Amino acid sequence: MGRLPFGRNLGYHESVPGASAPAPRHGKAAATQRGSVMKSWAIIYNPTSGSFSPERLEAVQRALHDHGVRAVPHPTGHAGHATELARQVNGVERVLSYGGDGTLNEVANGLLGRDLPLMFIPGGTANAMAYEMGVPRDPVRAARALVAARPVPIRPGRVGSRAFLLMAGFGFDARAVYLVTEALKARLGWAAYVWTGLRALFHAKPELRVRTPEGAEHRGVWVVGARSRRYGGMFTVHPRAGLSRPALGLVVVSKAMIAPFALSNLALGTGFSNGGMRLEEHRSFTVSGEAPFHAHVDGDYLGKGTSFEIGLAERTLPFCLPDGS
C-alpha cells in the first residue's frame, strides 16, 4: 500500500485520498445534519498500522457522519508524529486515535494537559485497549459504540515523563518488543510478539531490582507496571489493574517462573502470586539493574537504561469510555 500524504495543515478543509469527508446522505443521516450543527472531531491515524486501509477509514468517517460528526483525518508519517499532531490540532471537540496501542500512546502523550477528550478506534496489531475497554475490534463497529461515550478523567502511568495507558515493561518482554520489526508484524500479526517472546525466552536475562516506596525490594527478570488488566490483547497480566485504580499494578517475575506465570496468570487469569511471581499495587516504584536493560511502553520500544522511575502522571486525561467500563 502506498503511503498517504502527511497531514501538515491542521485546518478542516484538508483532503486525504481514499479518506475524504463523506458526502451527505438521504434519510436519517440527512435529517441529523439538517436538525443540528455537525460536531468537529479529528482523527489521528497511522496509515501503516496492522489493519488500516483507506476504505476502512472512510467507513469510520461515514459511521460518525451518520451521528452528526465531521471527522477530519490527520495521518502520521514517522515515529512521534501522532504526539506532534495531538499537540497542534485545534478547533475540535474530540480527538480520535485510529491505529494500534502505540499510536494511542503517542496521541495520549500529546493531549496530556490539553483538556481535549481522547477516543480510541482499534486498527493495529494487538489492540489491547479494545479488549480492556470491551469494544469491538472492528473499527466501524467501535466508532458506533463509542460515538456517544462519555469522557472520563483518567490518570495514565508514566516512565519518567513518558505517559502510558496500558503498561510499561522491563527486561524479558521489553526485549521481545525490541525484536519485533514492522515486516514481522505485517507477516505474522499479533503472533510476531509470541515469536519474539520465545526468542527472548532463550536469551540471557539480566536480573532487575524493584524498590517500592515502602522500602520493599523484589528481584526478577520481567517487570511490568500496569494500568490495564490486559496484556497483548486477550491475556491477563494483573487482574486488579485498571485506569480507574488509584495505584499501578506491579508484576515481578523471576527467571524460573516465566513459564508458570504465562500459564497461570497470562493464559488462565488466576491472579496467583508468590515469591517468584509477585502481583502488588503501588503508586510508584523504581526498576534498576547492573547492566542496561530493555524497556517499552504500551508495546512501543522505549530504549535501554540502568534505572527507570515508574509512577502515575500528574495530569489527568479525558478518555472516552463505554458505559460499564
Image (tube, helix red, strand yellow):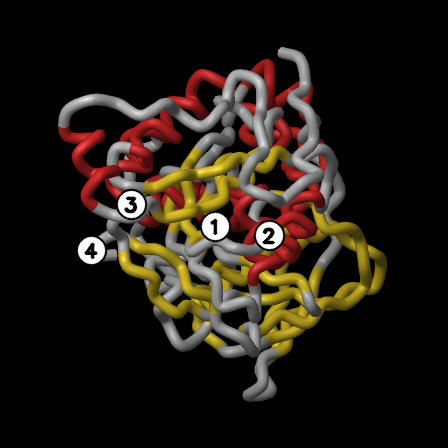
Q: Residues within 10 Å of mark 3 (few under 14, many from 20)?
A: some
Of badges 3 and 1, the one in the foreground is: 1
The three-letter code of the residue at mark 1 reads: Val
Q: Residues within 10 Å of mark 1 (few under 14, many from 20)?
A: many
Q: CA distance from mark 3 to mark 1?
A: 12 Å
Q: Earlier in the sequence, mark 3 or mark 1?
A: 1
Q: CA distance from mark 4 to mark 2?
A: 27 Å
Kind of element beneath mark 1: strand
In this view, 87 is above or below 314: above
The three-letter code of the residue at mark 2 reads: Val
Of badges 4 and 3, the one in the foreground is: 3
Task: Residue at 32%, 49% (x, y): give it.
Answer: 133
From this viewpoint, is residue 314 visible?
yes
- Quadrant assignment for the C terminus: bottom left
Task: Residue at 54%, 29% (x, y): give it.
Answer: 194
Of badges 2 and 1, the one in the foreground is: 2
Residue under pointer 2:
89
Quarter where residue 66 is shown: top left
Task: Residue at 53%, 24% (x, y): give it.
Answer: 50
Q: Which mark is residue 95?
A: 1
- Residues at badges 4 and 1 in contact (C-beta under 8 Å)? no
Q: Position of residue 314 (x, y in %)?
A: 56, 78
Q: CA distance from mark 2 to mark 1?
A: 9 Å
- Residues at badges 2 and 1 in contact (C-beta under 8 Å)? yes
Residue under pointer 3:
146
Residue under pointer 4:
323
Quarter where residue 14 is shown: top right
Q: Earlier in the sequence, mark 4 or mark 1?
A: 1
